[in-house]
Amino acid sequence: MLNTNCFAILMLFAGAFFSLAQVPGTLPIESDKETPTLKTDEGSQVSVITRFVDTPETGKPCTMEITLKNLGSLPLEELVLSQEWKTKPEILEVNPKPFIQENKWTWEIPELQPGTGKIFQFKVLAADKDNLNFKPAVVYKVATLKKNAETKDGLLVQVQGPQWVRRGQRAVFEIVVANHGLTPAENVTIRDKLPQGLRHPEGELIEATLGDIPAGQTKSIRLETLAVENGKFSQNIQVASTNGEKKLYQSDISVSDGQINLQWKKSWEDTAKGELEMILEAKIDSIKAGQIQIAIQTVIPEGLEIVGSNPQARFESTAPTNKLLVWNNPQVIGGKWSAKLRLKAAKPGDWQLNAKASMENSADTASMFLVRIEGTSEIQGVFAPPTIKATLGNESEIRFSLKNNGSIDLNNTSVRFLFPDGIVPLAWNGPTIAGLNGQNLNFDDLPVLANRADKIYSVNLKGLSPGEFRVVVEYGIGNIKRSSACSITVSPLP
């Protein structure tokens, strides 16, 4: 049974830069080291780290990033991360997608386990540089164990360390042991069986003693190893106390001579047509470039049509509505590879582009991009035909077509015919009721003009005198008006 304790915390941190030191001559174990604490409440330690990926400049795209981490020993539940803006910026990319209400963005995270984190990245365009300010706030609940006389052991093991390391460099792990029980965990020991790809001066079996861990407290050790062999490995960690049960933990790591990173970029977008071009870029860091197996793939979700790709990819079906594009061993130049994908959306909406890259003896990497097409209105009015010939005293018909060539529906579209002196409207027809006011024929507003829809207005008229005349139609939405004209030639009676 869990009790929860709710509180809010707001912390801002500047970005930090780290340099990798040389491989040390000895690889020590530091025991009895407490986990760094930023904010503590019954074992919780939460950090919010913010950074600019791009230098913020007025009128230029800026990528911003918020990292949320649980550095504590207890799980966090019902987290709500919010970012409030001075004024609402233009969204270019956002991952993951927030709930947007006015100038406030909100993300909901059901759970964040100890030693884990989550990154929120977004690219925005702001007219005012002062608007590019971080204002994150976090609200969450801390899970605690209810007192239970039968609970003898509550050990929790977490390993913080890299998933990939280059051969010849060091791999540093932080093994964190938390006691969630009601009584001290006595004489806690750690046994770490290193895989063949990692080496330590003490051999493949590392043993360390943490001593007693009081109830509700945490201890950790720092283990530095040397990556000596390429491959994908697992180290098996066993934690035990003399008065409790054993705990087992498996930590995976890849060792290779390089790594591969993926990134989506938007090249251009035509909102009127619902088309855009995306660039999928891979950066390969390897001392054996050209000698390793590489595979890159992406899934195009339902609602997006592939217009073209360069270089060409192999198409595979993952589902009736999804398409999988695969590039096997693509040509890498200067450690880089890229592909251009031209996509088209049938209607406004949001889609996720997910890409994955695999490289021999390296952990898979992934990249996600949120495609958002807001939709545009493109109203057009034309006469068909634009010119007619009439005879004095005889009736003629003119036809006006109102078209919505955009990707979103239009609401309350107005249409008004303006007749010159010498031309008299006799009868009319259209999608709404119309009334004649002098020489103006006003149709009631059209409630909805669906995207790609076409509505026809027709008028029967008579010329009262010979000559050249122009019938004008004003159409539009609100104060935005356009016009189209029809030329009428009225010939005298023979």
Image: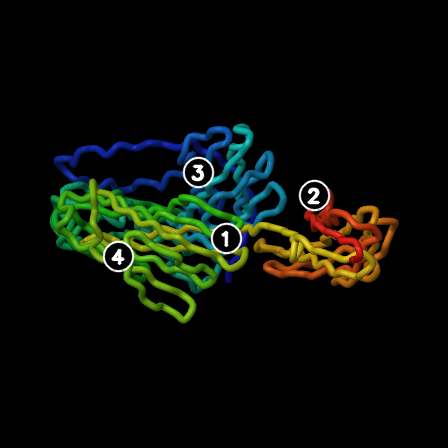
Label 3, secondary structure: give it.
Answer: strand
Whole-Å distance between the Cαs marked 3 and 4? 28 Å
Of 341 and 446, the residue lying toward us: 446
Write down the residue under mark 3.
63
Determine the residue located farthest toward the front in the rendered image. Answer: 494
Look at the image and tell me in which quarter the C terminus lies.
bottom right
Is residue 214 something that shows in the picture? no
In this rendered view, identify the residue nearer to me: 186 or 417. Answer: 417
Q: Earlier in the sequence, mark 4 or mark 2?
A: 4
Find numbered disc 4 in the image and state the secondary structure of the residue it sits on. Answer: strand
Ranked by sequence position, the earlier of labels 2 and 1 is 1
The residue most toward the bottom is 320
Gap in Å between the C-alphas at discs 4 and 2? Answer: 48 Å
**309 or 244, nearer to the observer:** 309
Which tag is nearer the camera, tag 4 or tag 2? 2
Mark 3 or mark 1, which is nearer the start of the sequence?
Answer: 3
Identify the secondary structure beneath mark 2. strand
Which amino acid, mark 1? Gly
What numbered label is drawn on residue 480?
A: 2
Q: Tell me what residue is drawn at x 75 percent, y 62 percent.
A: 430
Q: CA distance from mark 1 to mark 3?
A: 24 Å
The residue under label 1 is 274
Element marked by disc 1: loop
Mark 3–mark 4 CB contact (< 8 Å): no
The answer to whether residue 299 is above or below residue 369 is below
Q: Nearer the viewer, residue 274 or 107?
A: 274
